[in-house]
């Protein structure tokens, strides 16, 4: 078990990087890139490059190889006296060893040793009987990477139309598709109370989406400058009319895109589970390989889509205009800086999240993800990116209760729903959440 000094640090860093992932991406979406001085809100164009944001995520995941390389160099050249850091180490039994008295001042402290092992668990090779995932078999990770590409791009498009907190809450629909796909493809068993939990999650997502549709957040967008002599009442009425006509519809489309993206994310988790049930690979290397494959596929796809759509009159300045996206990233410092910060935060979120899962439990990871959503909501309210909605609280409460009930964090309300035997985990290898 990890020491008390390491766990709070891992928790704090996971929450910090996880919150930054969503908020920095939403901050990019709010940056004006064209017609920023226009008095007509319809003419103001903001950063809308979901494909580039997906590439940022994969670069951050590929950055996990830097941590892996640093660990390899350290264990090879600087950790010769730390045999537990080497893959082939096995403790010698007491009956085959000679007892040697070691002075206390020369013996390593247990706390320092435990802290080191706790921090690097995502980097330690597996020691079971599975086949090592090396050589051509690594290409299998391209399949979940492609699912990650599709799901993340859809979520980035959806985030353009909804508030950050609604985006994060809607992602709670993931547990529904993971449950269904685990039953169909991995032949897992779901009990009655877990099916009830999935329906509660669906209801929570529906309520959150309804809250976003009823009360969209035009204040989340930068307001146009007020021209001299213009009527404040006329501007207010124009903004309100625009919100009624298009804001609600955009929110509904955004929620559906984010919820639909969870189908691809759930497919990614199930594919990872199927691969890692047969092959062994350090979790951080799994993230690194998927980052490499995902970026390569994204880059090739960006070129094809730019040539086919982005350079046409209809596609110019759109999602697939690669030239315009590159111009916006390089020309506006706020977008360039946040792009780098997003890459760093995604790499850190993967490392600290895996450390939490392997040191504590997946249940703790689930609770922390709930806290992450709550912090995103609080920060968004504080920044004025959205308004407080009571209906959103109801949806969030349903999502939290359904998720906790499904993961056996809370007990079912009826004794008849309680199973005598401990339910089998849907994904024993624990899914690797990338953002």
Image (cartoon, rainbow, N blue to C red):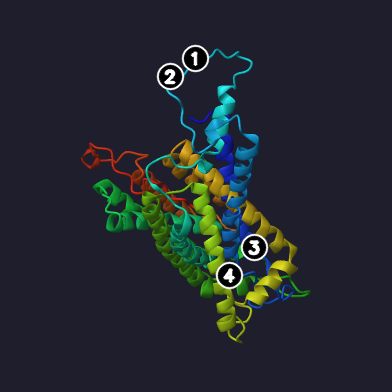
Residue 352 in the image, given as x and y percentages of width and height: 55, 43
Mark sitting earlier along the chain (4/2): 2
Residue 338 in the image, given as x and y percentages of width and height: 67, 58
* Distance in Å between CA atoms under marks 4 and 1: 59 Å
Q: Which residue is mark 1?
A: 99
Residue 234 appears in the figure: no
Check the image and report above or below for 113 versus 246.
Answer: above
* Distance in Å between CA atoms under marks 4 and 3: 20 Å
Q: Disc 4 or disc 1, which is closer to the eye?
A: 1
Instruction: Please give left or right for residue 335 compared with residue 413 in the image.
Output: right
Residue 50 is tagged as none
* Distance in Å between CA atoms under marks 1 and 3: 61 Å
Instruction: Please give left or right for residue 382 compared with residue 200 in the image.
Output: right
Mark sitting earlier along the chain (1/3): 3
Check the image and report above or below for 418 versus 150.
Answer: above
* Distance in Å between CA atoms under marks 4 and 2: 55 Å
**Circle 2: is it few (<14), some (14-19), or many (20+) Cα within 10 Å?**
few
Mark sitting earlier along the chain (1/2): 2
Asked which secondary structure carries label 4, the reply is: helix
Q: Which residue is mark 4?
A: 299
Mark sitting earlier along the chain (2/3): 3
Kindly indicate whether the residue at mark 2 contacts the one at mark 1 (C-beta within 8 angstroms).
yes
**Circle 1: is it few (<14), some (14-19), or many (20+) Cα within 10 Å?**
few
* Distance in Å between CA atoms under marks 1 and 2: 8 Å
Q: Which residue is mark 2?
A: 94
Looking at the picture, tell me which residue is in the foreground, 302 or 38.
302
Check the image and report above or below for 96 versus 192.
Answer: above
Q: Based on the displayed image, in which of its 4 quarters is residue 56 positioned?
A: bottom right
Looking at the picture, tell me which residue is in the foreground, 226 or 378.
378
Mark sitting earlier along the chain (4/1): 1
Residue 28 is tagged as 3
């Amino acid at each position: 078990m990890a020491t008390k000094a390491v766990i709070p640090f891992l928790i704090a860093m996971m929450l910090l990087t996880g919150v930054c992932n969503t908020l920095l991406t939403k901050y990019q979406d709010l940056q004006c890139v064209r017609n920023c001085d226009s008095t007509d809100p319809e003419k103001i164009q903001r950063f809308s490059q979901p494909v580039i944001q997906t590439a940022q995520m994969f670069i951050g995941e590929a950055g996990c190889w830097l941590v892996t390389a640093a660990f390899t160099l350290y264990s090879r050249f600087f950790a010769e006296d730390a045999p537990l850091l080497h893959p082939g180490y096995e403790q010698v039994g007491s009956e085959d060893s000679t007892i040697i008295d070691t002075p206390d001042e020369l013996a390593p402290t247990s706390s320092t040793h435990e802290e080191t092992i706790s921090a690097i668990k995502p980097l330690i090779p597996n020691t079971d009987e599975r086949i090592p995932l090396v050589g051509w078999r690594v290409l299998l990770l391209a399949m979940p990477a492609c699912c990650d590409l599709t799901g993340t791009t859809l979520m980035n498009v959806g985030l353009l139309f909804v508030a950050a907190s609604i985006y994060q809450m809607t992602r709670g629909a993931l547990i529904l598709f993971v449950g269904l796909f685990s039953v169909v493809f991995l032949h897992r068993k779901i009990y009655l109370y877990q099916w009830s939990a999935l329906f509660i999650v669906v209801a929570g997502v529906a309520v959150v989406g309804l809250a976003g549709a009823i009360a969209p957040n035009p204040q989340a967008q930068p307001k146009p400058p007020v021209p001299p002599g213009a009527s404040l009442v006329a501007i207010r009425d124009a903004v309100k009319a625009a919100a009624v006509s298009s804001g609600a519809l955009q929110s509904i489309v955004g929620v559906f895109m984010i919820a639909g993206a969870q189908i691809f994310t759930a497919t990614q988790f199930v594919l990872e589970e199927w691969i890692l049930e047969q092959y062994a690979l350090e979790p951080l290397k799994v993230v690194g390989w998927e980052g490499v494959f995902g970026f390569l596929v994204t880059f090739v796809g960006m070129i094809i889509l730019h040539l086919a759509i982005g350079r046409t009159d209809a596609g110019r300045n759109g999602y697939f205009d690669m030239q315009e996206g590159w111009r916006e990233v390089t020309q506006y410092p706020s977008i360039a800086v946040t792009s780098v910060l997003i890459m760093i935060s995604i790499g850190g979120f993967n490392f600290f999240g895996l450390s939490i899962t392997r040191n504590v439990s997946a249940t703790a990871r689930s609770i922390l993800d709930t806290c992450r959503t709550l912090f995103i909501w609080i920060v968004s309210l504080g920044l004025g990116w959205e308004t407080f909605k009571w209906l959103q609280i109801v949806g969030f409460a349903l999502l939290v209760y359904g998720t906790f009930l499904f993961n056996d964090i809370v007990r079912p309300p009826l004794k008849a729903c309680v199973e005598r035997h401990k339910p089998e985990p849907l994904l024993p290898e624990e899914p690797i959440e990338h953002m």
